[in-house]
Amino acid sequence: MTESELLQQIALGEDSRHQFKRTVNHPDALAAELVAFSNSGGGTLLIGVNDDGSIAGLNAIEVRRINQLLSNAASQHLRPPVHPLTENVHTQHGLVIVVSIPDGLSKPYLDHQGRIWVKQGADKRHVTAREEMQRMFQRAGLVYADVVPVADTTSDDLDEAAFRRYFEQRYGADSPYAERPLDAILQNLGLGDGRELNLAGLMLFGRNPQRWRPAFSIKAVAFPGTSIADSRYLDSQDISGPLPSQYTEALAFLKRNLHRVQGDQGFNSLGVLEVPEVVLQELLVNALIHRDYFTSASIRILIFTDRIEIISPGHLPDSLSVEDVRQGKTNRRNPTLTEHAFKVLPYRGLGSGIPRALEEWPQIEFIDDVRGNQFTAQVWRPAPQWEGVTDPVTGQVEAPVTGQVTPQVTPQVIPQVTPQVRQLLRAMSGEHARQELQALLGLADREHFRKAYLLPALEQGWIEPTIPDKPNSRLQQYRLTDKGRSLLK
């Protein structure tokens, strides 16, 4: 790294991947920083830089001392050990040590006192919540939520008829194991421990899973507009029961709240869903099977006039990115649940569900919200047309409100506006910083926000920067143009 590159990096300030230190003196404090970076995706520690970004610099003696301290801290003051790389950069104010800490492969990392640290913004925090610790052990493959026994359950809490149907379908009615005691069969299949059901057994075949796990349900709401803050709703349902029942009822909720399009079908036909049904099936199954069962929260289905959101508790495991998911790569967060889901849900495995949904309907965005610990599949609905749209409640063909827009405006303006840009414009009420707009839209990925929302809106003239001659200013904000305000009206 050159001095110029170092200065450019320092000018960006501290964040979750970069931290400044004037100097370091205590191995335990340094170990806590290494633990936090290793548990949170890796990062860079710049030693010899003040908190305000000015370079304090180090002399040769300090560099030797800090390197020895770093070596001791990395090998002896945290476990498992980590292997940071260092580079000394010469500046006019002295040397700066650039310490690169890789993303850890053996999470969770702990300091000398057995504490787990993670990054939170530019700072670090001590992990104390049991659920968060469980998720970290889960990501490391040390424990899985779906095989944790559910206290006080027994095989009597199973819908035995449903389980027997599954067993015969998968293993055959004449299987030599069919005559064994039920508890023994469940234990052999990994659905119990011989005394209690585990989570996979309860959620797949339990008579009333929410008696023990009330949060593991689906909350579905259909809104008349585009905002979750709307106090009105068209339809709502709390969906409980085992996973097969949740899937069936959630799919029915989606289908009754979406339009049907006549297309080439006859006048008396019911029509086809505006979004292909296979898309809804794949995304629902993905949410039920791959959600984080260490997080006590419900799956949410939100239907707006312009989009559908299926929100699963738990962000993507560390080894996966949104692009990986789009390409069909997978990480089995709940391996026992997925093993038995083939016969009770339309689940195919192999990571094929998301690519299949995208092939049928490319207008899907996936949002991995690490900070909020949730994963959202956002399905954009087609813009209503005058002809061929069937109201989901009355069954009658109706014209949408947007039919009031004059023919002169529609072909010139509407086709240029993507759903993402529309969402951005609706969120703006004054002057907003980039971070504020991301927060309003619930987007964690800065690059995705920039490419899909901010740049198209700027290039098409719907919004404008408040400091146009300094596009990279830290004081930069954005506001609607007259053209943008006219579009919203």
Image (spheres, grey):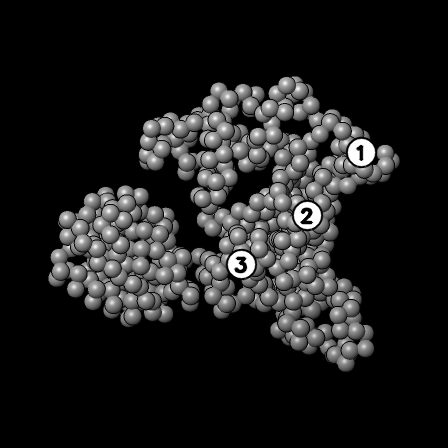
70 versus 357 height, above or below = below
Residue 294: which disc? 3
Q: Amino acid at mark 3?
A: Phe
Image side of residue 89 versus residue 473, left or right:
left
Query: Which callout, 3 or 1, points to the residue nearer the camera?
Result: 1
Where, quadrant-wise, is the C terminus in this rendering? top right
Image side of residue 65 versus residue 137, left or right:
left
Depth check, front residue: 142 or 470? 470
Q: Amino acid at mark 1?
A: Gly
Depth check, front residue: 244 or 71? 71
Percent of width and height locating residue 24: 21, 58
- The residue tagged 1 is 395
Q: Secondary structure at mark 3?
A: loop
Q: Amino acid at mark 2?
A: Glu
Circles 2, 1 touching at the beta carbon (< 8 Å): no
**Distance from label 3 to label 1 (Cα)?**
41 Å
Percent of width and height locating residue 72: 24, 69
**Distance from label 2 to label 1 (Cα)?**
25 Å
Depth check, front residue: 304 or 92? 92
Percent of width and height locating residue 162: 76, 64
Q: Classify residue 180 by image quadrant.
A: bottom right
Residue 127 shows in the view: no
